[in-house]
Image (cartoon, rainbow, N blue to C red):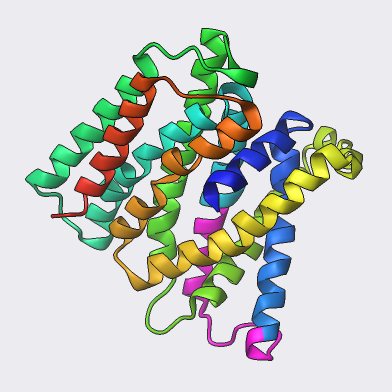
Amino acid sequence: MWGFGATLFGLASSRSSAILVNAFRLPAGATLLWLAWVITTGTVWPEGISWRQHMWLGLSGTLGLAIGDSFYYKGIMLAGPRRASLMLAATPVVAALTAWPVLGEKLGTLALAGIAVVIGGILLAVLGRDDGAGDHRGVPRAVLVRGLGAALVCAVCSAVGNVLAKLGMPGDTPPLAAALVRGWWATLAMGVFLLGRRDIVAQLPRLRDPRVLKPAATAVVLGPFLGMWAAIAALKLTETGVASALLNTVPITVLLPAWLIHRDRPSPTALLGVAVAVGGGALLFLR
């Protein structure tokens, strides 16, 4: 889901803007989550969500969805989905470093080794010979660096957001309820941001373009609806680090859609770097 969703959102962003696409996906995804809640529970809104949970889930949604994903789609626009998604391999590293002081999950020798492996895999894939292919062949070095930097910001935001989401789901909080609250807080945050961006608001008519709307609408179902629901469930039912490691497979799952949609075939060195980085992310949480 995440691999195809990211590629389709990136395609829509390249035909409009990253912020515009994120401004569309957040309320659309939150609305689908709300409909799912109404249909499955017969109630209009989750009850028993404390103000403290709202605070943690709101911060998580703002950081991970409103801010982080906007940077991610910008990275996809500049570097392509395959290479931008590689930077998400850093997510478990940041999650582990954040969970240490916040959740009390200490880092042992194996975890530190995993961090080193992740960094090594990223460097191998980024610094190795990989000029891209298809629609993203020959991207200027400066543009590529900006794209990878934007995706790295997303990795940091996502990791911290995962830890905050875990804090917002104590006890028997239903994952769908947490995803719903998180999604609407992210939508509110994006709306507040757009109040000062008349240039983005002026671009809203672009969403009527089928070349933007079709991939974005399809990706909404895969990402902010089904994907976020599954991600929050994983964070609820497993340790934060384990869930982050599983979500860290995006650099692998994005390879097929990037190849099919953009004809961006990875080089052997890039494939090796992805495998090493994702393996390091899993190593972090085998301790």
Give the residue at the far left of this rendering.
109
Q: Name which residue lies at 20% across and 58% down.
A: 105
Kindly report the secondary structure that dominates the magenta region of the rendered protein: helix
Q: Residue at x 74, y 46 (%)?
A: 216
Location of the C terminus by quadrant is bottom left
**Closer to us: 252 or 112:** 252
- In the rendered image, residue 58 lying in the magenta stretch gets the answer yes
At a point 42% along the width and 40% down the height, the residue shown is 252
Q: Residue 172: give x, y in percent of width and height.
A: 41, 84
Nearer to me, 190 or 218: 218
Q: Is residue 200 visible?
A: yes
Q: Which residues are magenta?
A: 40-62
Q: Quadrant of residue 125?
A: top left
Magenta run includes residue 118 = no
Residue 58 seen in the current view: no
In this rendering, the answer to whether 141 lies above or below 66 is above
Residue at horizontal 17%, vertical 54%? Answer: 286
Residue 45: x and y in percent read 66, 82
Work out whether residue 92 or residue 85 is closer to the camera in this orientation and state it.
Answer: 85
Q: Is residue 98 above or below residue 45?
A: above
Residue 198 at x, y percent in the picture: 84, 37
Q: Quadrant of residue 187?
A: bottom right
Taking 110 as reference, is 184 left or right?
Answer: right
Q: Position of residue 281 (x, y in %)?
A: 28, 44
In-image side of 154 versus 95 (left or right): right
Q: Disc count in the image?
A: 0
Query: Residue 56, relative to residue 279: is it above or below?
Result: below
